[in-house]
Every structure is written in structure tokens, then in C-alpha cells.
Image (tube, coloured by chain):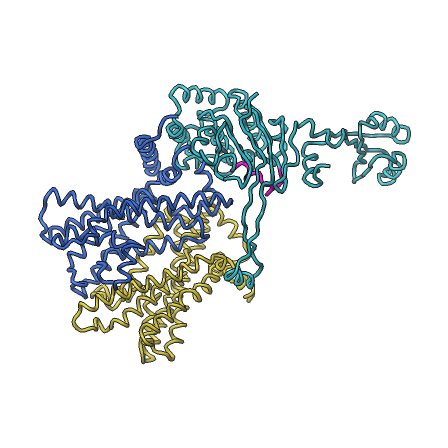
Chain colours: A cyan, B blue, C yellow
């Protein structure tokens, strides 16, 4: 398999202004300024294969968009090497642009006042797309989503969901090797999110396009990505399969039960009985975190059944969201 | 990838222009009000000019019709900047909000792509007004007519336009460094109002400044001399087409440099 | 009266504008350049008149008048129409309407911070340059007090006119067209481009009956007259006061009516 993107020891530093506080501070800033160097991306390396869908995750300000800007050729790395489709993006920005598509969740790149089809026609010229390829692409779009109703609508009259959909279609129009999607589902309702995810999934399968997805919505990640990369404070925390990620913290599941009798009292008894497990309780449920490598949920249930009359129970998998949250909060051990 | 020459860019520009005009027509009320606004601006400019000459019969040896000619000349030469480069006014907002980055992902020239987005049709009213003024004063001055003169005035109008475009580009591009660059753009716009007066009214130091540093003297004065005072055309007038191209090229480089540098500092 | 909540807005405005260091420098430099242009232009204009006194104004008078008119213009210009128009189009106005303050006052006090900075960075330096250049041609005395009172009234009239024009944006999408018309009319008829005494009859009489001259012409006339009779002062300030009341009241009613209509129609 060939790598479409190679990133080797890339670092990016910015000079930022330290602003002072308050009215007095502002007047001081007028005469003397205090700069500091911030390392937005710190020694990151990764290789990405053609056709992969990668979830690029991290809390706000982690350095995600800086990395993406470097891959799209808008930013020059302070040090390190980036190759995108064999090009150095910063040096061959326009050449690189031919190979990539970019979508920013809330910044439409389409012509605001024009109907979608006219935007597509202009893009056809800009990217020098052949007539045949262009028509095939539109036909494929038609088979994936109901594009007909959108084509003759000016972008500014579209809902946010329709706009995002249009932007994604526009990004794939010239059949780029890589598409960068920056929070494509931000601010969308549940059904629109599902629609967008299906579309991205289908386009990736159809054209074997590499997709690099940044998002804060773990639903996107679960639906689309097999591999995820997590960065925080510019440093790479994790780069591996998504299944692997869950195992990172052991195979935990949460057992929730409801019992006859006073809840807080029962919880204390459970705690005594299951001294080696972590037990918590709220107004309705007693929650027991079970590490399945040590003991099974069934064993725990059987043990409790001897003491209590269990009225109701629930079993919860630890979600990707929980794991990511844990990583953001604690880092990787 | 095919080579992207002038034809490629021209084709794209025409396509965007045609679409843009079509969509503008759908906002009829806005279009009409803006046009009226533009006419108002021109009339007001003319009225203050007329009030001035109502009190004084000449300025620095330049008569009413000669100054009127300069005035018309400056109006026409300001048309291209109004029509084709109006998006410069929005640059600051795009940079401030970070939206500017969306222009950086296309495989075509960034400057072209950015400016192509807007065509301001209002400028055409100004063009008509300016042409009318030139023709009227031309007749009143009894300048006569020859094909050579026509060629001269066209070349020098283009020259003057290039200078104004260059000034505006440079002013707009300052927003890549300065947060509130509106003042710079506003300043340049205000100064173009003074382009219609002969540069000889200034002291030598400022004559130098307005010729080489902030070249507003090239917007109307130097080029008009070729038509108005054919017997005493200074070398600078003949050189002005050269200066026009030079200043335009410099401003383009400055704009692009700013755009790259801005992206470099992130948003 | 909870003056504190208003002053908080003023303070925030000052902090915001101080962040733009280079912008302030450019503002100062731009004003100086502008002063120079006006100086030379009118000097050469007066040089071509025989007497040196035109319509009762000497070159120095005209210079002071125009320069301070521009300084006042910069001081008062708050881009109210632009901001209102944009907020209305983007729907952000709904958020502003939820603030525990009348929208009119909220907007005014948000701008008041820039009044303070503009005063220190444009009005005061310009004033000082004018005093130096004209060797103290501005009389010092009770007229400064009249001037201050008159400027405050001018600010209020100007803001009220802006607010009315901004309200029109609730009805039309054409912010640019509306704004440019307002700006052109106000600039010309307030005497900011050419002093009103230079206007020919009957234009002059008409202009004196309009509210616009109360913005710039009134305070400047008070500043420049050496020994004004109390009658003149009373008439000028009285006229301003009447206009201020009429326009403010009209603006308030217009805003209320428009807002009701908009809320009923659902924007």
C-alpha cells in the first residue's frame, strides 16, 4: 500500500502577543509589547494510506487546524517534513490544491449568491474537470443524495445542513486524492448528521478518497473512522485503531441495578460485598464498574441476587466518548 | 494539469461575472437604492466643485473647464477599482473572522480568486458621469479631436486606473498586519478625492510625496497634461504608463506577501 | 440613574480601540497628511482671489473651519448605520434587544469609548496643530465653552440622524446605498466639505433651515466668532436644541413603530 501523506517530525511555532489586563494594561500595551513563542504542533509524525478515513481528534486549541493548514499548504512548518501526494504542500500550494478538497464546517466556500449548480460549473473550470468526469460525478451524487432540489437554490437560502452537504459535494467534485473535513457535522440535527455521515462513507468507498476528519462528535468517529489520531497541546497522544482504543483502559462495563429497599443503605451493603469493585449510586441506580478481565458481569449478578431482590438492571459499554474524555483529562499512561 | 494562462483566467472571470450579475438582478431594490446612492455621490461631488468655482474663478492658473476635465478624468479612472476590486473592502472582515482561509485552497491564483468574487456594477454609473464630464469639458475647451488623442486618453486612463488599483490593494493588504486597517483604506479613499487638483498647488516636498510615495498625482494630473497642455508635457507624464504597471505589480506582490504571512501567523 | 452600566460600555470601548496600536498611528498620520492637503489646496485657491477675504472668511478662517470640521467628522463618525444594518441582516440584533437597556442607548454607549480615544488621538492633536500653524488665530475665551456645548448637541443630532437611517435598514437590504446617501447629504449640507458661507443663494438659505448645519457648522461658527452677541449664541444653540429634540423624538417613535411591525411580521 502506498502512503498518500507522510508527516515526519513536524513542529510549528507561533509568536503571540501577551496582552495585559484592564484599561491600564491596554495603555501599557500601547507602548511596549511582550511576545512569547507558542509551540502549536510539537514533533508529530504519521503516515496515511490512500483510502483511509482518519479521525483527527483533540480538545479545542490542541493544534488540529494548524496541522491541517500545514497539510493543505497554507502554513509552512517550522521544522520537519510533510509530503502530500509526493508534493511539498507549502512549496507547491496550487499544485497541491488540485489534489485536495477542504470543507470547514461553518465557512462555506461556495459562491454565496449563486445557485449550487453554477458554483459547480465554476469549480469545473477552476479544477479543469473534463466533461465526462463531471457528468459522471453529478450522476453519482444524484444516486447518493437528492441533489436535484439543491442544485437550483442559491447557497445563502440553504439551511446549514444543506449548505454543509453542498460543501462536501463541492469538495469531492474534482475527485481529489484527499479530503479534509473540519467539523462537518457541527450544529446539525440528528438526522442531518446521519445523512452527512452516510454521504462521506459512500464517497470514500466509491472513490477510495482519503478522508481526514476533525470533529468533537464521537458519533462521527464511530460511524466513519477505523483509525484515530489524538493530539493535545501539540503533542501526539494516540495513533491507532479505534477498537484498540477501547481496550486501552481494560474491558470495562458498567452494571446498573435497581433493588427493593432504601437505596443508600443497599449501596453500602453492595460496597461491602464487592469490596474490590468501584461502586457508586445516584437517586435511582447503583452503578458497579466491572473489569471483565478479572470477573464477569454474570458472576457479580449472581452474587448480588443472593442478597437483594433485583427489580431492574442495565448494562453499559464504555463509549468512545468516555475513553476520549479520559485521554483528554488524564493523558495516556 | 493543463497550463493556466490568461485565457483560463479570463474564462473563469467571465463565468463568475455573468452569474454574479444574474443574481444581483434578483435583488432589485438593493440595486436601485445603491445606484441612486452612487448618483448622489457624484452629484454631491459635482455640487461642491461648482460651489467652489462659484467663489473662485481659477485654481493655480487652472480654469474652470480644465479642472472639470481633471475631475471627469479622475472619475473615469476610478471606475475599474470600483468595479473589479471592490472585494478589497471586505478583506479586513474576512481576515478578522478567519474566513479568509477559505480562499487559499483553490488551485488558482489567490489574488485573482479573491477579487473575482465581486463585480460592483455601481461603478458603471460613475463611468457614465465621468465620461460625460470629460466630453463636455473637452468641447468647451475646444481641444479638437484626432485618433491619436483618443488613443492617448485611453492609454492614460488605463494608467491612472492602475495607480488607483495599486493604492487600494496596498491599503487593503495592510489588514494582514494591522487589526483595524479600515482607517488605512478609508484614508486612501479620501485622498483620491484630492487627485482631481493639479499637483502644482503643493510645495516641492509634498509634490514629491504625492508623485512617488503616495502617487495620487498620477490619477489625473500627469496623465491629463498630455491632453490639456500638449506643449509642455513633463517627462513624468510620458513615463506614467510605466509607473502604473510598476505600482500595480508592487501592490500585487505586497498583497500576496501579506496573505502568505497572515496565514503563517495563524488565526 | 445607573450611570455605571453605561460607563462600563465606555471603558470596554476604550480598551478595544487601544488594542489597535498601529491603527492609531495611522489615524494620526493620516490626519496630518489630510491637513497638509487642505492647507495647500485652499492656499492656492485663495491665492487666485484678489482680496484675500471671500464671503467674510480669510484663508486662515477657512483652514480652521475645514480642518476642524474634518476632525469633528472623524470624532463623530461611529458607523452606526453599518453596524445596525449588519446586525439586522445577520439577526444579531435580537441579542442586543434582549439587553437590559434600550437599544438606542446601548449602541450609543458602546461607541462612547471611541469618542474618548478619538478625542485624544485626532481632535486634540488637530486642534493643537491648527493653533500652531495659524499662530493662535482661534480666539480663547467664553467661545470655547459655547463650542463644547454646541459639539455635544451636534453629536446627539448626528447620532439621531444615523439611528433613523439605521432603522430604515429594517426595511431594506441595501445598507451600502442607504449609508452612502446619508453620508453624502450630511457631509455636503452640514458644511463639512465647503463652508456654508460659500454657498450661493438660495442654497445657503435652504441649508440654514435644515438640521445638518447644526452638526458641524454651528459649533465651528461659535468657535470662530470673536465677540458673538448673546443673541447669536442663543439662536445657534437654540436651533440645535430644537433640532435635537425633534430628531431624537422622531427617531424614537420611528424605531418603536418599525420594531413592532418587524416583530409582528416575524422579521
Q: Position of residue B183 (x, y in %)?
A: 39, 55
Q: Is residue C17 magenta?
A: no
Q: Is B242 located above or below residue A317 in the figure?
A: below
Q: Which quarter of the rendered picture does the N terminus of chain B lie within?
A: top left
Q: Quadrant of residue A183?
A: top right
Image spot of residue C197 (x, y percent): 25, 69
Whether residue A13 appears in this view of the structure is yes
Q: Nearer the viewer, residue A128 or A120?
A: A128
Image point (87%, 37%), residue name: A271
Residue A319 placement, left or right of A173: right
Count of numbered marks: 0
Of residues A193 and B114, the one nearer the viewer is B114
Judge whether residue A66 is colored magenta: yes
Q: Is residue A253 above or below residue A32?
A: above
Residue C63, percent from left and from top: 29, 69
Q: Decide if residue A226 is on the left or right side of residue C68.
A: right
Going 39% across and 51% down the picture, which residue do you hit? Answer: C168
* Spot occupied by residue C242 in the image (x, y as percentages of width and height): 37, 68
Q: Seen in the image, is A267 located left or right of residue C260? A: right
Pick whichever, B220 or C147, lies toward us. B220
Q: Is residue A187 visible?
A: no
Above or below residue A143? Residue B204 is: below
At 53% across and 58% down in the image, what residue appears? Answer: A33
**Which contiguous range is marked in magenta?**
A58-69
Amino acid at each position: 500500500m502506498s502512503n498518500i501523506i507522510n508527516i515526519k517530525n513536524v513542529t510549528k511555532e507561533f509568536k503571540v502577543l501577551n496582552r495585559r489586563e484592564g484599561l491600564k494594561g491596554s495603555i501599557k500595551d500601547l507602548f511596549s509589547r511582550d511576545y512569547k513563542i507558542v509551540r502549536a504542533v510539537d514533533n508529530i509524525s504519521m503516515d496515511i494510506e490512500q483510502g483511509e478515513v482518519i479521525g483527527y481528534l483533540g480538545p479545542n486549541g490542541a493544534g488540529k487546524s494548524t496541522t491541517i493548514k500545514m497539510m493543505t499548504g497554507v502554513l509552512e512548518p517550522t521544522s520537519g517534513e510533510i509530503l502530500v501526494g509526493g508534493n511539498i504542500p507549502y512549496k507547491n500550494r496550487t499544485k497541491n490544491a488540485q489534489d485536495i478538497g477542504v470543507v470547514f464546517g461553518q465557512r462555506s466556500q461556495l459562491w454565496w449568491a449563486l445557485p449550487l449548480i453554477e458554483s459547480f460549473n465554476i469549480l469545473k473550470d477552476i479544477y479543469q474537470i473534463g466533461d465526462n468526469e463531471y457528468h459522471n460525478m453529478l450522476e453519482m451524487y444524484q444516486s447518493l443524495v437528492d441533489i436535484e432540489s439543491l442544485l437550483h437554490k442559491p447557497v445563502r437560502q440553504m439551511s446549514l445542513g444543506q449548505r454543509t452537504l453542498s460543501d462536501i459535494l463541492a469538495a469531492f467534485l474534482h475527485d481529489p486524492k484527499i479530503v479534509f473535513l473540519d467539523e462537518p457535522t457541527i450544529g446539525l440535527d440528528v438526522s442531518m448528521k446521519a445523512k452527512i455521515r452516510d454521504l462521506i462513507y459512500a464517497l470514500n468507498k466509491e472513490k477510495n478518497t482519503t478522508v481526514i476528519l476533525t470533529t468533537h462528535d464521537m458519533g462521527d468517529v464511530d460511524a466513519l473512522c477505523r483509525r484515530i489520531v489524538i493530539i493535545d497541546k501539540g503533542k501526539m497522544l494516540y495513533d491507532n485503531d479505534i477498537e484498540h482504543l477501547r481496550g486501552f483502559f481494560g474491558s470495562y462495563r458498567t452494571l446498573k441495578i435497581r433493588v427493593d429497599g432504601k437505596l443508600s443503605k443497599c449501596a453500602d451493603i453492595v460496597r461491602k460485598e464487592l469490596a474490590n469493585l468501584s461502586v457508586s449510586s445516584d437517586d435511582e441506580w447503583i452503578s458497579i464498574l466491572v473489569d471483565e478481565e478479572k470477573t464477569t458481569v454474570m458472576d457479580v449478578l449472581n452474587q448480588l441476587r443472593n442478597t437483594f431482590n433485583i427489580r431492574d438492571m442495565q448494562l453499559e459499554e464504555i463509549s468512545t466518548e468516555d475513553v476520549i474524555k479520559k485521554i483528554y483529562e488524564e493523558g495516556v499512561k | 494539469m493543463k497550463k493556466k494562462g490568461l485565457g483560463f483566467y479570463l474564462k473563469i472571470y467571465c463565468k463568475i461575472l455573468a452569474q454574479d450579475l444574474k443574481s444581483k438582478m434578483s435583488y432589485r431594490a438593493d440595486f436601485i437604492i445603491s445606484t441612486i446612492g452612487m448618483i448622489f455621490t457624484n452629484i454631491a461631488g459635482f455640487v461642491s466643485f461648482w460651489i467652489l468655482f462659484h467663489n473662485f474663478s481659477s485654481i493655480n492658473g487652472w480654469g474652470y473647464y480644465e479642472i472639470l476635465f481633471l475631475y471627469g478624468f479622475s472619475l473615469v479612472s476610478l471606475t475599474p477599482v470600483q468595479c473589479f476590486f471592490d472585494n478589497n473592502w471586505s478583506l479586513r472582515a474576512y481576515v478578522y473572522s478567519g474566513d479568509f482561509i477559505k480562499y487559499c485552497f483553490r488551485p488558482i491564483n489567490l489574488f485573482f480568486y479573491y477579487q473575482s468574487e465581486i463585480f460592483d456594477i455601481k461603478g458603471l454609473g460613475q463611468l457614465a458621469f465621468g465620461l460625460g464630464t470629460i466630453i463636455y469639458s473637452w468641447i468647451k475647451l475646444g481641444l479638437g479631436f484626432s485618433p491619436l488623442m483618443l488613443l492617448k486618453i485611453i492609454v492614460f486612463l488605463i494608467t491612472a486606473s492602475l495607480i488607483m488599483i495599486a493604492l487600494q490593494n496596498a491599503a487593503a493588504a495592510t489588514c494582514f498586519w494591522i487589526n483595524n486597517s479600515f482607517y488605512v483604506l478609508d484614508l486612501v479613499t479620501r485622498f483620491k478625492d484630492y487627485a482631481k487638483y493639479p499637483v502644482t498647488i503643493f510645495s516641492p516636498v509634498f509634490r514629491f510625496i504625492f508623485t512617488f510615495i503616495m502617487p495620487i498625482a498620477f490619477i489625473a494630473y500627469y496623465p491629463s497634461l498630455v491632453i490639456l497642455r500638449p506643449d509642455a508635457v513633463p517627462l513624468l507624464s510620458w513615463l506614467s504608463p510605466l509607473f502604473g504597471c510598476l505600482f500595480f505589480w508592487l501592490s500585487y506582490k505586497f498583497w500576496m506577501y501579506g496573505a502568505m504571512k497572515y496565514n503563517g501567523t495563524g488565526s | 440613574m445607573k450611570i455605571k452600566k453605561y460607563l462600563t460600555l465606555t471603558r470596554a470601548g476604550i480598551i478595544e480601540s487601544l488594542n489597535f496600536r498601529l491603527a492609531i498611528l495611522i489615524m494620526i498620520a493620516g490626519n496630518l497628511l489630510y491637513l497638509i492637503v487642505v492647507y495647500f489646496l485652499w492656499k492656492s485657491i485663495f491665492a487666485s482671489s484678489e482680496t484675500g477675504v471671500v464671503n467674510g472668511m480669510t484663508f486662515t478662517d477657512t483652514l480652521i473651519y475645514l480642518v476642524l470640521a474634518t476632525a469633528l467628522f472623524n470624532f463623530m463618525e461611529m458607523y452606526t448605520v453599518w453596524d445596525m444594518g449588519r446586525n439586522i441582516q445577520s439577526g444579531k440584533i435580537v441579542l442586543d434587544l434582549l439587553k437590559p437597556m434600550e437599544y438606542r442607548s446601548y449602541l450609543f454607549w458602546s461607541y462612547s469609548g471611541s469618542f474618548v480615544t478619538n478625542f485624544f488621538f485626532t481632535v486634540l492633536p488637530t486642534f493643537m496643530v491648527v493653533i500652531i500653524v495659524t499662530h493662535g488665530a482661534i480666539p480663547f475665551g467664553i467661545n470655547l465653552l459655547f463650542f463644547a456645548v454646541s459639539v455635544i448637541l451636534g453629536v446627539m443630532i448626528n447620532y439621531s440622524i444615523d439611528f433613523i437611517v439605521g432603522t430604515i435598514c429594517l426595511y431594506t437590504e441595501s445598507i451600502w446605498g442607504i449609508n452612502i446617501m446619508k453620508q453624502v447629504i450630511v457631509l455636503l449640507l452640514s458644511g463639512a466639505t465647503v463652508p456654508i458661507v460659500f454657498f450661493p443663494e438660495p442654497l445657503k438659505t435652504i441649508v440654514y433651515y435644515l438640521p445638518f448645519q447644526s452638526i458641524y457648522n454651528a459649533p465651528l461658527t461659535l468657535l470662530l466668532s470673536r465677540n458673538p452677541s448673546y443673541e447669536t449664541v442663543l439662536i445657534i444653540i437654540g436651533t440645535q436644541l430644537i433640532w435635537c429634540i425633534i430628531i431624537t423624538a422622531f427617531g424614537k417613535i420611528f424605531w418603536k413603530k418599525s420594531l413592532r411591525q418587524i416583530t409582528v411580521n416575524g422579521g
